[in-house]
Image: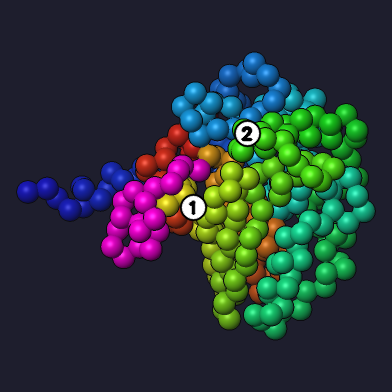
Amino acid sequence: MTNPGTTLAAPLLLVILLQHHLLSVRGFCRPTQSSHKPLQSHALALSATDTDADVYGPLSSTFNDLSNYMGGSGRAAVIWDCFRAGVDPNLCYRNEDGIDSSDKVIIESWLAATSTEIDANSIHQHRIDDFLGKRKEQVLGASALARLQEMMKERRFSACADDNVTESIYTIENSIASISQVKVSADGTTKLLIRMASGHEVESVIIPWVEKGFSTVCVSSQVGCAQACRFCQTGTMGKLGDLSAEEILVQIFYANKVCRIVGSPALPPCDNVVLMGMGEPADNPVAGNKP
């Protein structure tokens, strides 16, 4: 008879390795030497298909690839700092406040559900002073922003096969994903409904641990799920598709945004990620396990 511990150990280990690789290889860690193949094109498109899985978007590119494309590690570091804080560099370095439509949704949802006070007028200054640190005086010039726009446009096209963006620039919201809905519980647990550029929607959840000073973000790895577990509502949907690495990481981007806007102690910074949202991560190893 099979040992139950042995049966559970293999898939659990795979999930742990998938989580570790996703965070360590993508743009949410310190730079490492990359084994990523040189790109045929500087358009860092992303697709979860086998043929395109080795090409990434701005959120999922390695630091070395982003540095090479942007023309310097300093520019790449500034972009990474923005992403870690849930700030869109396409907006941050183009207008005075750098605030997108999701900021307002986050603030209104939190004010309606809790007694937390949020000073909307201080969001921009707080962001610049805190998340950029020693690089807060460094800016992205016209050339760097143009390169970033090319990357965002290609990401938009790879997600939905069109470039019919009505806004004047390509952003995280109109090229990768946007927040459709925010629900906040009395204890601060925050559920995000995130709409991908492809039109699919997935859920992410931020769970604060105020006593420990950090939050955990639970992200989805698929749209729907083929496992059909009886206790899980997602299983009734069936599997509609795999999320790409970019679409998984954008959930962390928005979780970081919510935590930055709300702030501690109500919602401490995200310091832990679990792939326990919609989907079975072991059924989608391409997005989380490609160097």
Task: Examine the rendering and report whether any part of residue 68 can be seen.
Answer: yes
Position of residue 121 relative to residue 274, above or below, is below
Segment colored magenta: 226-243
Three-letter amino acid code of the residue under disc 1: Ser
Percent of width and height locating residue 79: 76, 41
Position of residue 133 relative to residue 205, above or below, is above
- Name which residue lies at 76% across and 30% down: 150
- Name which residue lies at 31% across and 46% down: 11
Q: Is residue 231 magenta?
A: yes
| Mark 1 element type | loop
70 and 112: which is toward the camera:
112
Percent of width and height locating residue 247: 57, 44
Position of residue 264 relative to residue 136, above or below, is below
| Mark 2 element type | loop
Q: Which tag, 1 or 2, sits closer to the chain's start?
A: 2
Q: How dense is the environment of label 1, judged by Cα within 10 Å: few (below 14), some, or many (20 and up)?
A: many
The residue under label 2 is 161
Quarter of the image for residue 276 reads bottom left
Quarter of the image for residue 72 reads top right
Quarter of the image for residue 94 reads top right
Q: Is residue 244 magenta?
A: no
Left or right side of 130 for 274:
left
Quick check: marks 1 and 2 in contact, CB under 8 Å?
Answer: no
Percent of width and height locating residue 96: 92, 53
Q: Which mark is residue 36?
A: none
Q: CA distance from mark 1 to mark 2?
A: 23 Å
Q: Which mark is residue 220?
A: 1
Percent of width and height locating residue 84: 69, 49
Left or right side of 48 for 61:
right
